[in-house]
Image (cartoon, rainbow, N blue to C red):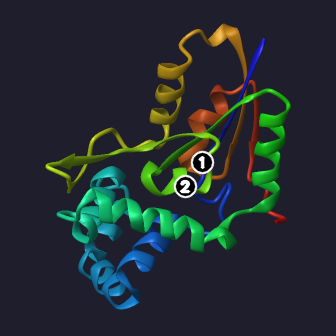
Amino acid sequence: MKRIVVSDFDGTLTTKDTLIEFIRYACGTKAFLWGFLLHAPLLVLMKLGIYPNWKAKQRVFSHFFGGMSLETFDGLCQDFARDSRHLLRQQGVQALQQAQADGAEVLIVSASIDNWVQPFFPEMKVVGTQIEVKDGRLTGRFLTKNCYGQEKVNRILALYPNRQDYHLTAYGDSRGDKELLAFADESYYKPFRQS
């Protein structure tokens, strides 16, 4: 039977949320603080469950990156991954590399934008939130649903529809991974915290 190993990215394989770290890296601390101050009321409403998570995330993303050329954005993503290896939990990276070496198909399934997740794991498949690009520039909108909660399961089923044909192992660390962990044959919650 085929073995598929799926891991969340932020918090599971990293020590910090990479959306925040990427914005600070790409835009600088001053712009980062100002942008989050502008969006503070919206973020409070999101935390209270009044405003949808994906809409708040898209508004913040659009504020910082809407209108940027895809070439510039992808360059920042490559630089961020190169300069931010310290954010990775080495035990998690090693577990995925070992699973791959043992013949499993390995996927990173993340609510983060796949443009900056993929450079951390060039040898693995990344399924993340995708961004809309028109005429070579980011519109600030998402092309796909935010890859969070049930959407993680939906994305796996889109790639591997015959659920009975594979054994699924999943790693996650948050509410956004609840459905994924429940869907898996074997699941691990906050598995790599000691590294």
Is residue 163 placed above or below 14 in the rendered structure?
A: above
Q: What kind of element bears circle 2?
A: helix
Nearer to me, 47 or 20: 20
Which numbered circle lies on residue 119?
2
Is disc 2 in contact with disc 1, using a CB cutoff of under 8 Å?
yes
Indicate left or right for 132 with 93 as reference. left
Residue 150: percent from left, percent from top: 48, 33
- Tell me the residue at 45%/63% (across/down): 77
Nearer to me, 80 or 167: 80
Nearer to me, 111 or 102: 102
Q: What is the spatial separation of the Cα atoms under label 2 and label 1, in whole angstroms?
A: 5 Å
Residue 136: percent from left, percent from top: 20, 52
Residue 109 seen: yes
- Tell me the residue at 40%/73% (across/down): 23
Q: Name the residue under label 1.
A: 122
- Tell me the residue at 76%/28% (across/down): 104
The amino acid marked with disc number 1 is Pro
Q: In which quarter of the image is residue 61?
A: bottom left
